Amino acid sequence: MAKLRVGLLFGGRSGEHEVSLNSAIAIATALQSTNNQQKYEVLPIYIQKNGVWQGGEPAQQVLKQNSPLTCNKATPQQLWTFPPQVSEVDVWFPILHGPNGEDGTIQGLLTLMQAPFVGSGVLGSAVGMDKIAMKMAFTQAGLPQVEYIAVDREQIWSNPCVFPKLCDDIEEKLGYPCFIKPANLGSSVGIAKARSRSELEAALDNAASYDRRIVIETGVTAREVECAVLGNDNPKASVIGEITYNSDFYDYETKYTDGMSQLHIPAQLPDEIVTKIQEMAIQAFAAVDASGLSRVDFFYLEDTQEVFINEINTLPGFPAFSMYPQLWQATGISFPELVDQLIQLALQVRSNLICHPVRG
């Protein structure tokens, strides 16, 4: 039987380029395991920071050295020239984190290529990336959330009369501390915690430099717990994991610096809370129309036994030591098995598509 050629698509133009490299190395290694090696051939396709696609030896070297290629500004012709390996791909495994990777843009391109791909489609990826659209979907699904306000850059970078009123409204509705987040960035980029008016003003200005849509959430004292979801129409939820850390909040540095945070799997929680979180994770998965995989993050208020959904990540980090694969490892699915199942789920989505003839 011929091997399926897996287009491992990694790198990308977002600030999470290096995170993508780490994820791709882990997946490539998993595809070389005994069982997977008999079924799949890996075709690495690397997107440089300037947007140019590379296959073959350059892509292999990036995986081998875990180091981005140096690049100059790309020409329009380069941006629309794909390496020959693209035409050989049977199924795509995009592991591009952040904007232009998990926001529906690359998913739209892969859909036009008419080849199956791992993960959510255009809608699930776009809603899962934009925190404001995501929160609206969660509200529609009846999932409890902390209080929040959505604003845009124009309100922040406005005249001296509008901005103070905006800050007044935030203080009145949310109080301090509150968290300011760009709506369309992952990995805690641009997120800040405000405890005073001056910190709020600075955080809003900073967030607006990253994104034109910003969300502000009230701060809660809670345990941060996460659940992994795997599947398409009948998704399954993993055991629950918990993140603890010594910093003020789970910012970018804490997330990606060794020793600054700890994962506890499974989290020590009452059985009824575990069940509730798992059910809510699957509800969230359906609410944004996700498929394949997602990690859903929650706040658990131990004193009141309340659970609030925080966000869904439709393309979580994939190094073997990260939360998503570790949750499945603890649930009974090894990392190579997980990678295999995700590819099979991608093929399942393709086989379920019904193509209607175009009537002229």
Image (tube, rainbow, N blue to C red):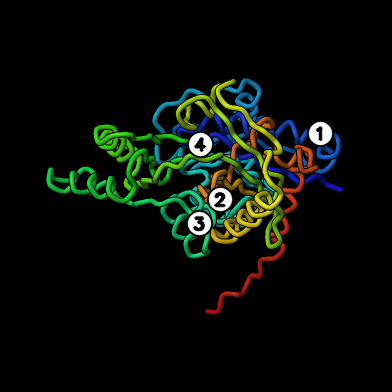
Residue 217 image offset from top left, x and y in percent: 39, 46
Characterize the local packing of mark 1: few (<14), some (14-19) or many (20 or more) Cα atoms within 10 angstroms: few
Q: Earlier in the sequence, mark 3 or mark 1?
A: 1
Give the residue at mark 1: 33
| Secondary element type, mark 1 | loop
Q: Residues within 10 Å of mark 4 (few under 14, many from 20)?
A: many
Secondary structure beneath label 4: loop
Disc 2 crowd rating (10 Å Cα; few below 14, some 14-19, many 20+) is many
The residue under label 4 is 12
Amino acid beneath label 4? Gly
335 relative to 311, above or below: above
What's the residue at 68%, 53% (across, down)? 272
The location of residue 8, given as percent across then percent down, is: 65, 39
Residues at badges 2 and 1 in contact (C-beta under 8 Å)? no
Cβ atoms under marks 1 and 4 closer than 8 Å = no
Query: Which residue in the structure is indicated by mark 2?
Result: 307
For the residue pair 167 and 29, the one nearer the viewer reads as 167
